[in-house]
Amino acid sequence: MLNISGVIPSAISYAAISTTGSSNVSWGHLILFIVIIFAFLITGVMSFIYIERRVVSRFQIRIGPNRAGPFGILQPVADAVKVLIKEDIVPDNADKVLHLLAPAIAFIPALMIFAVIPFRDGAILADLNIGILYVVAVGSVSVIGIIMAGWSSANKYALISAMRTIAQVVSYEIPMSLAIISVVLITGSLSMVSIVKAQTIPFILLQPLGFVIYLLAALAEVNRTPFDLLEAESEIVAGFNIEYSGIKFALFYLAEYAEALAISAIIATLYLGGWNGPYLPSILWFLIKVVAVFILIIWIRASIPRFRIDQVMKFAWKFLLPVACINLLITGTQVVFWPDASAWIMVPAYFVIMAVVVLVWSKL
């Protein structure tokens, strides 16, 4: 079902597509969308920091930020100013060049992901015909920055955290990719725009198990609770960023929330219908879905304690990977033998299959 012929030439020609679909290079379009994406990322990250603090405070029965600005809305701004004026300290034995480059390498891939995220029909920087493959590839690059940070810091705790990064990201990359392949099988396209347009009903209803697999694997990929073993203070102090301060620490902090924003946008695109929705403007529907996914991530953080490292690895290899393979097999069977099956039949069938697979495999 997938047409991958001419992938490289098509990818090159799509690198500068304008919103009107013209294949001519439009520098104005590129510059405009780069500014929009950067502004969206910075605004989204600061908003997410505020939302997380307020929501988690409610879970923990406390007030949360309420001093800087009305309802504490300027607290992220105050924190940003504070961290930017802090002294930049570099260990004597550190590799100065790698220590400097690591934060940028960790942050830039999170920014690049938004190049193929469609905010609405036609509002996208580059509608690559390999868009979701680009997301998987670029999303894996940020781990290099973390490894560089741990190695260059000349700190054994930072190095241990960086090595955990390698093990964790490699382990969860596989089930996450299998969950994405299930969506690609249904749509027959790797384009993010095509995936959204193919969702006459949100894929969370046709792929509930794939949605759960992708969400959990993505949380582990971006070091969010309960998979935040890379920053286990009780075991390895503060993790790979222990020797960072000032603006370089701020970049790592920004990268973590940028990645959370990115996976919220990806889930909204793959499973929640992207910009599709009645009555409201399409861009507003997209933002509502992104915020809803992030609140779900916060809910998970506030409800589930951190796993041990052995539990994290076992969960990836002994549960998520087999379940993702089963989900892919079931999806492939349905696409091959019942491609025109009614949604009224497939939606309840997939939910029943999800319940049975999770229950049976967890017992095994």
Image: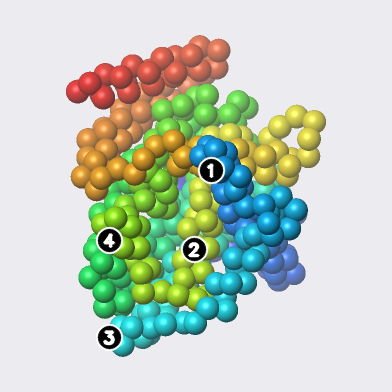
Say what amino acid the circle numbered 4 marks.
Ile
Q: Residue at coordinates 70% horizontally, 38% vertically from top-left?
A: 285
Q: What separation in Å lies between label 4 and label 1 (alpha carbons)?
A: 24 Å
Pointer 4 local density, CA inside 10 Å: few below 14, some 14–19, many at least 20: some
Task: Give whichever of discs 3 and 4 has the lower sequence position.
Answer: 3
Classify 114 as above or below 349: below
Residue 236's disc number: 4
Q: What separation in Å lies between label 2 and label 4 (alpha carbons)?
A: 18 Å
Residue 93's disc number: 3
Q: What separation in Å lies between label 1 and label 3 (alpha carbons)?
A: 39 Å
- Disc 4 on helix, strand or loop? helix
Which of these two is toward me, 62 or 311?
A: 62
Q: Residue at coordinates 51% horizontally, 47% vertically from top-left?
A: 263
Mark in the foreground, 2 or 1: 1
Mark in the foreground, 3 or 4: 4
Please report contact status of discs 2 and 3: CB closer than 8 Å, yes or no. Answer: no
- Disc 2 on helix, strand or loop? helix
Q: Where does label 2 land, which residue? A: 253
- Disc 3 on helix, strand or loop? loop
Pointer 2 local density, CA inside 10 Å: few below 14, some 14–19, many at least 20: some
Q: What separation in Å lies between label 2 and label 3 (alpha carbons)?
A: 24 Å
Which image quarter: residue 292?
top right
| Color encoding of the figure | rainbow
Say what amino acid the circle numbered 3 marks.
Asn
Q: Where does label 1 land, which residue? A: 56
Residue 277, position in %: x, y?
Answer: 71, 32
Please report contact status of discs 3 and 4: CB closer than 8 Å, yes or no. Answer: no
Say what amino acid the circle numbered 1 marks.
Val
Classify 61 as above or below 18: above
